[in-house]
Image (cartoon, rainbow, N blue to C red):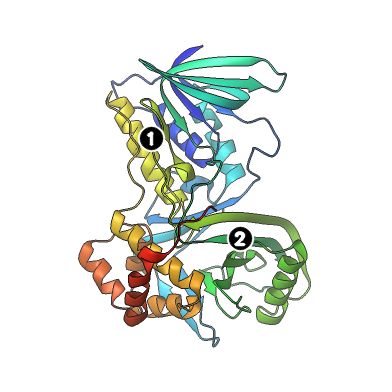
Amino acid sequence: MQCDVVVVGGGAAGLSLVWRLLNPPPGVPAPRVTVIDAPPGPLRPPPRTWCYWERGAGDYDPWLSASWRSVRLHAPDGRAVRRDLGWLRYKMLSSERFTRELQPWVAGARFVEASVGEIRDRPDGATVFCRGAGGAEERITARWVFDSRPVDPAPSARVGLLQHFKGWFVRTEHPAFTPDAVDLMDFRTLQPPHGLSFGYVLPLNPHEALVEYTEFSAGPLSEEAYDEALAHYTGSLLGLEDFEVRAVEQGRIPMTDASHPRRTGRSVFRIGAAGGAVRPSTGYAFGAIQRQTRAVAALVHANREPLPPAAYPARALAMDRVVLLGLDSGRLSGPDFFTRLFESVPAERLLRFLDGRTRLLEDVGIGLRTPVPTMLRLIAELPFAGRRAR
């Protein structure tokens, strides 16, 4: 089997790229695309919710679960800080709706259900060796290969934490939520010895919301611990009564300064989280995935080498490295740090900063609103942080 492009993985990065490849500008032929996705089982990610922000209307707006113009933060002392997002909108999209609605737009691709083994460079492209559920081996040769699978083993890092969370989709008997704002970080939760924890509320209507408990710490909790934290948050802090848990969401996101090479061969590239699309200090990735896949598709259509662009500028990653070291070492109070930024930086600018899309002077202004003496000490310590496997 020969084609122009092979995309490994049918998640957010893979399907976003396929959709853009198959919808070229006028006068440009669409490439022949093959998508190789793992059979149902542990190699496929479970259904999940993606949140991101963008200016005005976007490509996926008809499929959104909800969107909001305002966000809220609850400081550890209980005070609420609400911020309008200006031209931005905070958006919520389910992976199931995304996959279902994209099907007509990616129908021109060939889909193969198989486990990928070796990807071998050739003088004129690359060959992907894969094995289907029945055990039959297939070789697919393409000019370009884009791999979105998680990197295994994970690259080593000097500093890092794990973002891990569990959420309940709840429905209450009586109105309990204000649908016009997201509770982005609620720091009234009990804080771990290192890292931080917070509640996260995405209201869909007065009766329904996704309520999550999130930690940035060294490792995940037991199922019982997540449920206890959610019960405390929904009952003691949100005051919810007589509610039904209609679905559960759970996940883990590495937050490290590990290097993510975007090229692994002459014709083989990594995209999505495997290609560095996860912002180390927050775990957000969906917006960066859209920018990355849009740029790659444009390069393929222009018949140029489609090296995926870096998801974030180097100075943004350097600042993240300092923040992660502070949270991991306990020298930086996460709740105080994020509350201080939220109170002193306009929300639209702060979200653009988290997307790596602010200018240098804006970054300097944001940096001056952090605890500068502590940050300078962490910068001095950073070269001595030992690299470790994660």
Q: Earlier in the sequence, mark 2 or mark 1?
A: 2
User: Quarter of the image holding residue 176?
Assistant: bottom right
User: Is residue 93 or residue 269 the one in the foreground?
Assistant: 269
Q: Position of residue 33 (x, y in %)?
A: 46, 22
> Of the residues shown, which amino acid type is indicated by label 1?
Arg
In the image, 129: left or right of 44?
left
Q: Using a 10 Å C-alpha cutoff, classify the residue at mark 1 as few (fewer than 14 neighbours), some (14 to 19) or many (20 or more).
A: some
Q: Position of residue 222 (x, y in %)?
A: 74, 63
Q: Position of residue 219 (x, y in %)?
A: 62, 62
Q: Is mark 2 on a helix, strand or loop?
A: strand
User: Is residue 32 or residue 59 the one in the foreground?
Assistant: 32
User: Is residue 10 or residue 258 the one in the foreground?
Assistant: 258
Q: Using a 10 Å C-alpha cutoff, classify the residue at mark 2 as few (fewer than 14 neighbours), some (14 to 19) or many (20 or more).
A: many
Tag of residue 226? none
In the image, 346: left or right of 39?
left
Above or below 236: residue 27 = above
Q: Where is residue 336 in the image (x, y as percent from the top left)?
A: 46, 81
**Residue 172 visible here:** no
For this orientation, the residue located farthest to the left is 361
Above or below 36: residue 348 = below
Which residue in the structure is indicated by mark 1? 263
Which residue in the structure is indicated by mark 2? 164
Query: Label 2 vs label 1: CA separation?
Result: 28 Å
> Of the residues shown, which amino acid type is indicated by label 2?
His
**Residue under the point 44% across and 52% down:** 258
